[in-house]
């Protein structure tokens, strides 16, 4: 009986400590960056291409428009993922967008909310892509879980950006085909 009291006491202390962790660190903020050996316009085009998203976002399935025009401020979409055999839907709202420069989005799910900003800068024919993320759990339990797994969340973003770099650098899709005037257009 004495050991049971000790075990229960330790268990209570661990549970209290778990929830205090969520109070002490209710949100996680991190930044990541890569340099891609492709011009900025192509990098931007690849990141906006839904057909390419599964190449750099693990588990990505599809995007479903809810309201607004995709790629504009105020656009709301549901983004579908399969994670560990389970479907996950994240609601994305575009909060700011400057084509070929930056896009800011709010991602909302049952578990957490995430403010996300992706910036692109041209540097000597290459493109620096950086992300800034602030995320918080949607309840006391999820805040505590997020505080414990902060490092793995940042590691996932680093993996996503590394995958994005590979996707962009191996891209063969021509997003900017040259329009060759026809003979009829030249005669006019």
Image: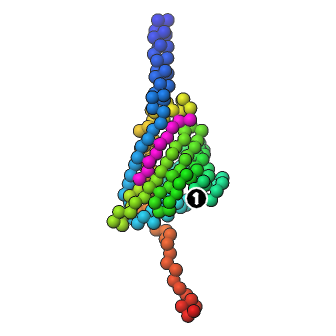
Q: Residue at x 50, y 55 (%)?
A: 103
| Magenta-span inclusion, residue 134 | yes
Total residue callouts? 1
Q: Position of residue 134 (x, y in %)?
A: 47, 42
**Direction from residue 146 to residue 110 in the image, left or right:** right
Q: What is the quadrant of the C terminus in the image?
A: bottom right
Q: Main secondary structure of the magenta part?
A: strand
Q: State the residue at coordinates (61%, 55%).
A: 75
- Can residue 110 be seen in the rendering of this structure? yes
Tell me the residue that label 1 is attached to. 72
- For this orientation, the residue located farthest to the right is 66
Q: On screen, 66 above or below 143?
A: below
Q: Nearer the viewer, residue 128 or 9?
A: 128
Foreground residue among 31 and 169: 31
Bin the neighbour count of mark 1 within 10 Å (Cα to Cα): few under 14, some 14-19, many 20 and up. Answer: some
| Residue at the left extreme of this rendering | 124
Taking the spot 45% from the left edge, 11% from the top edge, the residue there is 6
Q: Residue furthest bottom?
A: 187
* Residue 89 placement (x, y as % from top left): 60, 46
Please provide the residue range marked out in magenta: 130-138
Q: Is residue 40 magenta?
A: no
Q: Is residue 54 visible?
A: no
Tell me if residue 187 comes above or below residue 22 in the rendering.
below
Quarter-wise, where is residue 155 in the image?
Answer: top left
User: Percent x, y for residue 30?
Assistant: 42, 43
Q: Quadrant of residue 50?
A: bottom right
Question: Residue 49: where, in percent of width, then height?
Answer: 53, 61
The image shows residue 136, relative to residue 175, as above or below, that is above
Q: Residue at x 53, y 33 (%)?
A: 142
Q: Where, by quadrant of the figure, is residue 41 drawn? A: bottom left
Q: Secondary structure at mark 1?
A: loop
């Amino acid at each position: 009986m004495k050991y049971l009291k000790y075990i229960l006491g330790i268990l209570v202390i661990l549970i209290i400590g778990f929830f205090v962790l969520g109070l002490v660190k209710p949100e996680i903020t991190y930044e990541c960056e890569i340099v891609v050996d492709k011009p900025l316009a192509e990098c931007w085009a690849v990141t906006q291409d839904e057909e390419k998203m599964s190449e750099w976002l693990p588990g990505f399935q599809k995007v479903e428009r809810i309201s607004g025009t995709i790629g504009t401020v105020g656009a709301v979409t549901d983004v579908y993922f399969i994670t560990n055999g389970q479907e996950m839907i994240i609601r994305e709202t575009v909060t700011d967008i400057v084509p070929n420069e930056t896009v800011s989005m709010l991602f909302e799910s049952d578990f957490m909310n995430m403010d996300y900003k992706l910036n692109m800068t041209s540097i000597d024919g290459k493109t620096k892509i950086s992300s800034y993320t602030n995320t918080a759990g949607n309840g006391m339990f999820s805040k505590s879980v997020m505080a414990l797994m902060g490092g793995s969340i940042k590691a996932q973003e680093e993996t996503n950006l590394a995958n994005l770099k590979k996707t962009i650098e191996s891209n063969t899709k021509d997003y900017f085909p040259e329009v060759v005037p026809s003979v009829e257009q030249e005669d006019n």
